[in-house]
Image (cartoon, helix red, strand yellow):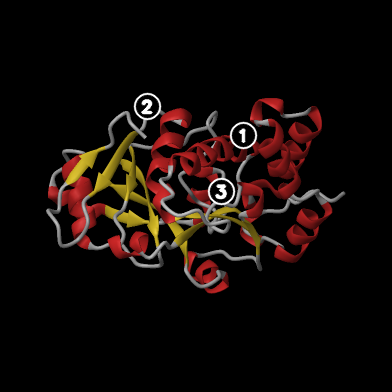
């Protein structure tokens, strides 16, 4: 089996990487096993498969450790969701929420591949002065200046720092810092190799999207997304961050049109 990890990231051969991915057993089988037996019943075969995925696909996929922790947190968040009316579609388990699609290297590309009613999760890196931040939200919108102002205020940085703000500074930085290919950068970082982040910033989104029962697509690789209820995303990110990198500050921005202030996430989910 060919390894993609040795291919330089700047000259990514997407066709080769996709062939490597489809040579591997699908994640649906891993998720189904966890659904039936629990994550604690992970077999040596599953551990080996996740390690091979990581080795073969390199920065084009989340790490096996991240996928396992993401599964645990997402399962817990789904269980906690209030379900006033039973719906087999809304209640489907994670192995039925995996979506394969053409490769995408940006949020806009991924959004175009998603079914109606599903929003892409978009994550970007931001440097404010000497501080490195990850900002994540949903949809393909860009950062507004008030987002940056509130981030600076949350970190007690002078507003002049905004003049030295850089967004997604370079492909090299993304790969070297986060061990993720552009299009794969997300808050679901490897718990044992956390980047030198000053903060993870959870951006606001339109309240009506949750009222409309929208879903969100979380990238597992350039070709795979996990589809979850949008209502799950905030508690999912809080729980994952708390378990994977508790030393990193988590900031949640208020929505536009409301008081433009930040709040620190508390210890609850």
Residue extending furthest front? 85
Q: Is residue 85 visible?
A: yes
Q: How many marks?
A: 3
Kindly indicate the quadrant of the structure image that contains residue 42.
top right
- At 28% from the left and 41% from the top, the residue drawn is 251
Mark before the other along the chain sequence, 3 or 2? 3
Q: Nearer the viewer, residue 37 or 267?
A: 37
Q: Residue at x 25, y 53 (%)?
A: 164
Secondary structure at badge 1 equals: helix
Residue 38 vs 216, above or below: the answer is above
Q: Which residue is mark 3?
A: 180
Disc number lying in front (3 or 1): 1
Mark 3 burial class by Cα count in 10 Å: few <14, some 14-19, many 20+: many
- Of 103 and 100, nearer the camera is 100
In the rendered image, residue 50, in percent from the top left (x then y), is placed at 72, 39
Quote the CA–CA distance across marks 3 and 2.
21 Å
Instruction: Identify the residue under disc 2.
Output: 247
In the rendered view, does 156 fall on the left or right side of 92?
Answer: left
Instruction: Judge from the rendering whether residue 51 lies leftward or rightward of residue 112; answer left or right.
Output: right
Where residue 235 sits, quadrant-wise, is top left
Compared to residue 166, the image places residue 265 above or below, namely above
Tell me the CA gap for discs 1 and 2.
18 Å
Q: Is residue 129 visible?
A: no
**Residue under label 1:** 65
The numbered mark, 1 or 2, whose residue comes first in the sequence reads 1
- Quadrant assignment for the C terminus: top left
**Residue at 61% from the left image edge and 48% from the top image edge:** 94
Marked residue nearer the N-terminal end (3 or 1) = 1
């Amino acid at each position: 089996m060919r390894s993609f990890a040795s291919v330089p990231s700047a000259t990514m051969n997407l066709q080769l990487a996709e062939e490597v991915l489809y040579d591997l057993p699908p994640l649906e089988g891993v998720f189904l096993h966890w659904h039936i037996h629990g994550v604690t019943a992970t077999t040596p075969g599953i551990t080996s498969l996740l390690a091979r995925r990581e080795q073969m696909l390199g920065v084009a996929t989340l790490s096996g450790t991240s996928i396992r922790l993401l599964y645990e947190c997402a399962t817990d968040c789904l269980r906690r969701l209030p379900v006033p009316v039973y719906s087999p579609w809304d209640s489907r388990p994670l192995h039925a929420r995996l979506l394969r699609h053409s490769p995408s290297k940006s949020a806009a590309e991924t959004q175009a591949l998603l079914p109606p009613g599903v929003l892409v999760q978009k994550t970007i890196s931001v440097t404010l002065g000497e501080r490195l931040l990850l900002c994540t939200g949903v949809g393909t919108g860009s950062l507004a200046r008030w987002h940056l102002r509130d981030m600076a205020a949350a970190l007690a940085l002078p507003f002049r720092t905004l003049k030295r703000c850089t967004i997604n500074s370079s492909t090299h930085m993304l790969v070297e810092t986060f061990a993720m290919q552009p299009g794969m950068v997300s808050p679901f970082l490897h718990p044992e190799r956390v980047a030198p982040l000053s903060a993870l910033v959870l951006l606001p989104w339109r309240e009506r999207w949750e009222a409309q029962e929208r879903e969100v697509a979380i990238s597992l690789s350039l070709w795979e997304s996990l589809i979850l209820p949008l209502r799950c995303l905030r508690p999912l990110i809080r729980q994952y961050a708390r378990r994977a990198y508790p030393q990193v500050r988590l900031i949640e921005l208020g929505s536009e049109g409301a008081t433009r202030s930040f709040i620190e996430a508390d210890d609850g989910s």
